[in-house]
């Protein structure tokens, strides 16, 4: 195929400018929606965008998921143009976080099973409390064998 592609480049007459196609992306946005009309307005505004393949609206979680060849910032601006307050989805599943109930990550407004996506400081390995918990940990090969 390499020789044929190279040969076809010489034979065809096209502009030298190649358009880059945007990568397939999934954009998740948090939008406060109260009724069916709000849901419909947000879905219609985003589904009319060029490159959008699918739009999933979950009113219970206040979440809009857009898949397609789109730019995330343009999707966010399009949702905000409906008059709704919108932001990128700030939550991740709580089982992906080391300490899901620290003050920065835990959010009462988050859907069940989700916490805020924040950078968490790892505990100091020299901390005496951390030494005690790792002493009896199953991950520690030198743990106490009496237990």
Image (cartoon, rainbow, N blue to C red):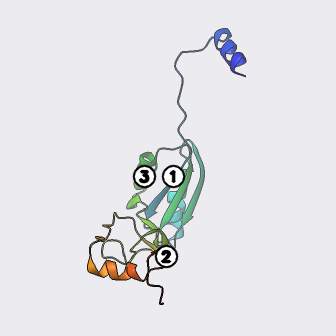
Tell me, for residue 76, which label it has, or none.
3
Q: Which residue is mark 2?
A: 113
Determine the CA span between mark 2 and mark 1.
29 Å
Q: Give the camera-side residue of 146 and 99.
A: 146
Q: Closer to the N terminus: mark 2 or mark 3?
A: 3
Residue 83 falls left or right of residue 113: left
Q: Nearer the viewer, residue 140 or 93?
A: 140
Q: Is residue 34 above or below residue 45?
A: below
Q: Is residue 79 above or below residue 140?
A: above
Q: Choose mark 2 or mark 3, whichever is in front.
A: 2
Residue 91 falls in image quadrant: bottom left
The number of numbered badges drawn on the structure is: 3
Answer with mark 1 or mark 3, whichever residue precedes in sequence: 1
Q: Say which mark, if any, is on residue 89.
A: none
Percent of width and height locating residue 123: 30, 71
Structural crowding at the residue carrying mark 3, measured as other residues with C-alpha within 10 Å and reported as few (<14), some (14–19) or many (≥20):
many
Task: Please tell me how crowded label 1 is: few (under 14), some (14-19), or many (20+) other residues with Cα within 10 Å.
Answer: some
User: Helix, strand or loop at disc 2?
Assistant: loop
User: Image point 30% across, 76% down: which residue?
Assistant: 103
State the separation of the CA atoms marked 2 and 3. 24 Å
Identify the residue under disc 1.
45
Front-most of 64 and 95?
Answer: 95
Outermost residue toward the bottom?
A: 147
The residue shown at (39%, 81%) is 135
Q: Position of residue 36 (x, y in %)?
A: 54, 68
Q: Taking 10 as reference, is 71 above or below it?
A: below
8 relative to 26 in the view: left or right: right
Mark nearer the viewer, 1 or 3: 3
Please tell me which residue is depicted at 49% across the width and 72% down the height of the picture. Answer: 95
């Amino acid at each position: 195929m390499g020789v044929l592609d190279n040969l076809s480049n010489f034979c065809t007459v096209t502009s030298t400018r190649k358009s880059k196609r945007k990568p397939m992306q999934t954009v998740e946005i948090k939008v406060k929606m109260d009724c069916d009309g709000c849901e419909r307005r947000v879905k219609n505004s985003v589904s009319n965008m060029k490159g959008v393949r699918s739009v999933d609206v979950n009113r219970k979680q206040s979440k809009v998921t857009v898949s397609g060849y789109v730019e995330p910032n343009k999707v966010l601006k399009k949702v905000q143009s409906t008059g709704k307050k919108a932001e990128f989805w700030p939550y991740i599943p709580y089982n992906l976080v080391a300490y899901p109930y620290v003050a920065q990550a835990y959010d009462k407004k988050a859907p069940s099973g989700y916490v805020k996506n924040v950078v968490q400081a790892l505990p100091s390995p020299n901390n005496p409390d951390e030494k005690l918990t790792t002493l009896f940990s199953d991950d520690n090969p030198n743990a106490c064998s009496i237990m």
